[in-house]
């Protein structure tokens, strides 16, 4: 294997910049994370940020292509790349990639994907599409359902290699604003998620059928009556919210009663919680292989001929 | 009618102190509001606050009774009054009233009411019980359903003169934290509720069956795609939330499919929105007579013999 990479792949989000140095055939040679997400770059000088992140990997001959997915292609990023519309496969996404100039070479920005539901309400992903194509790999099952938890959780349906529809759930942000700014936050000590309290929250979400405007108030009243210690309240709230997401999502995506197994893409901590909640609710779930972004960006680079699929 | 009142009735909440000077037979002679809610009284000197509020009505002979409901009887108030447990009628509430000394006389503090649902989760009201008994009047229908919108909306079921169960919905607080602290707030200009946008939010809540974690994200995506002007986003969010409350509440209270007509107790602005949302969702609704707190406190004073029902 050559010591030079075949591709530099960047998963460039709001908070972090994940860099992958990829060799022949798509193998990850090196991986570095930088706290250089687009919201961390106050002056908008993305070129300088990339300079900094690439320093350890210099010299980088100009013929080595660079590809970047995520919020770097948003209105707040380096250059806005229009969304590819569902149904969208690798080829549809590759078609609308947009280059920016950097040090006399090109950095290819990957578009996000948009869909519009039956009532005309749009939804968007940006960066997750690449993680999904990486996790899905070449095997194109008839249908798969991916879940990417986070500030805005994404549930994405893939059919025969194309993203056909998806929906966003504000679970993580809801937890943050309720903990930080509502009366519920006053009932809490610490942000650690107690596992038993988490399960209790999931069970309550199930019993009350989600119904968050009511069920959330239980965080307060259970606390008032000495039935939920302050150290457990954050876990209970997390369980209520994630449980509710797992109840809402299959219905929103039209799977009621026959949800396919969930494929979970995410960090270990969150993945464990989603796994526990899915088990409580009788949903089958498995974790995707890690480094999905690198694999997805490699597949995309192959699709548009930036690299050769086989060395 | 004597120029002296028969009763001083105080509806003493978190933000405001509403004072009623009530004459023979329960007629309100005078009504004054003060910005002296318990959270406004930093030093906790409730006696001095009451001194200030009663000044215009001096001299006040010591034989004229004073009764106060609301958060003044909470842990953060003048003295904590334990909750009366559901089912609770006027007599049950009167039984657990607690006096505090003020200027050598007594101020009677009214308890709140608590209930516990089938899964052991408590809920509480404090002050609303008095408004409801005032609005219900002497007529004791077989069953009535009261709605008191606000930061924490209260839905209360009354059967034969007793509060039998109720549920709280965090609608108003959810609106405030999402507008003030979430990504949705960035899509908004102004807090005014555009009526057409409000109805659109209600319709979407209905179409998606509440499911807030997902439906809320529409505030962002509709804005991103130019389908929801910033000036209308607050109204749409309000419609989504109030619509969802009206979907959740009948189910939480066990009324699915046969909800009794709603009796709405509240300020004019909110009442209009709830009325519009109820109409969209096919729920019958009417507004209660104003000054329910004064009427309820009068009935309570009669029940424990502080005043005579008929002059």
Image (cartoon, coloured by chain):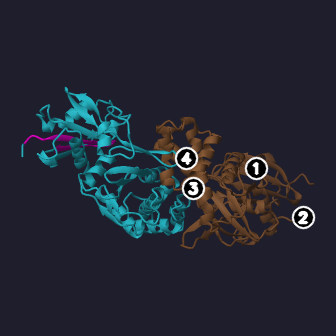
Chain colours: A brown, B cyan
Question: Can you tell which mark lies on residue A70?
Answer: none
Q: Which of marks 2 and 1 is nearer the N terminus?
A: 1
Q: Name the subunit of mark 1.
A: A
Q: What stretch is highlighted in magenta?
A: B3-21
* Callout in the foreground (2, 4): 4
- The residue most toward the right is A1
- At 37% from the left edge and 36% from the top edge, which residue is drawn? B82
Q: Which chain carries label 4?
A: A
Dot 2 or dot 4: first in sequence order is 4
Rendered view: B92 above or below B233 = above
Q: Are marks 1 and 4 on the same chain?
A: yes
Please say if B225 is above or below A62.
below
Identify which residue, B108 or A306, lies in the foreground: B108
Image quarter in which the N terminus of chain A is found: bottom right
Per the image, label 3 sits on a secondary structure element best described as: loop
Foreground disc of the pair 3, 2: 3
Residue to which mark 1 is pinned: A54
Q: Which mark is residue A170?
A: 3
The spot of residue A16 in percent (x, y) is 67, 49
Q: Nearer the viewer, residue B269 or B132?
A: B132
Q: Which of marks 1 and 4 is nearer the N terminus?
A: 1
The C terminus of chain A is located in which quarter? bottom right
Residue linked to disc 2: A310
Residue A101 picture location, percent across and down:
70, 61
């Amino acid at each position: 294997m050559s010591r030079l990479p075949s591709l530099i792949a960047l998963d460039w989000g709001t908070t972090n910049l994940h860099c992958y140095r990829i060799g022949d055939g798509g193998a990850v040679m090196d991986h570095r994370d930088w706290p250089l997400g687009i919201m961390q770059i106050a002056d908008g000088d993305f070129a300088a940020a990339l300079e900094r992140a690439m320093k350890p990997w210099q010299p980088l001959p100009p013929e080595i292509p660079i590809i970047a997915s995520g919020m770097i292609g948003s209105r707040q990023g380096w250059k806005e790349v229009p969304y590819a519309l569902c149904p969208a496969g690798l080829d549809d996404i590759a078609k609308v990639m947009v280059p920016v100039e950097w040090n006399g070479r090109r950095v290819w920005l990957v578009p996000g994907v948009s869909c519009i539901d039956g009532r005309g309400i749009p939804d968007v992903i940006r960066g997750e599409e690449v993680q999904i194509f990486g996790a899905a790999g070449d095997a194109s099952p008839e249908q798969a359902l991916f879940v990417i938890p986070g500030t805005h959780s994404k549930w994405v349906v893939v059919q025969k290699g194309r993203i056909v529809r998806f929906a966003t759930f504000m679970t993580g942000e809801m937890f943050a604003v309720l903990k930080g700014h509502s009366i519920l936050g006053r009932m809490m000590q610490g942000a650690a998620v107690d596992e038993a309290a988490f399960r209790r929250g999931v069970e309550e979400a199930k019993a009350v059928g989600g119904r968050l405007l009511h069920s959330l108030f239980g965080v307060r009243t259970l606390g008032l009556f000495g039935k939920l210690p302050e150290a457990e309240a954050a876990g209970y709230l997390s369980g209520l919210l994630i449980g509710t997401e797992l109840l809402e999502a299959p219905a929103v995506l039209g799977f009621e009663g026959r949800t396919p197994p969930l494929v979970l893409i995410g960090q270990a901590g969150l993945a464990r919680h989603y796994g526990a909640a899915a088990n409580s609710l009788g949903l089958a779930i498995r974790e995707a292989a890690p480094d999905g972004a690198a694999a997805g960006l490699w597949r995309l680079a192959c699709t548009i001929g930036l690299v050769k699929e086989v060395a």
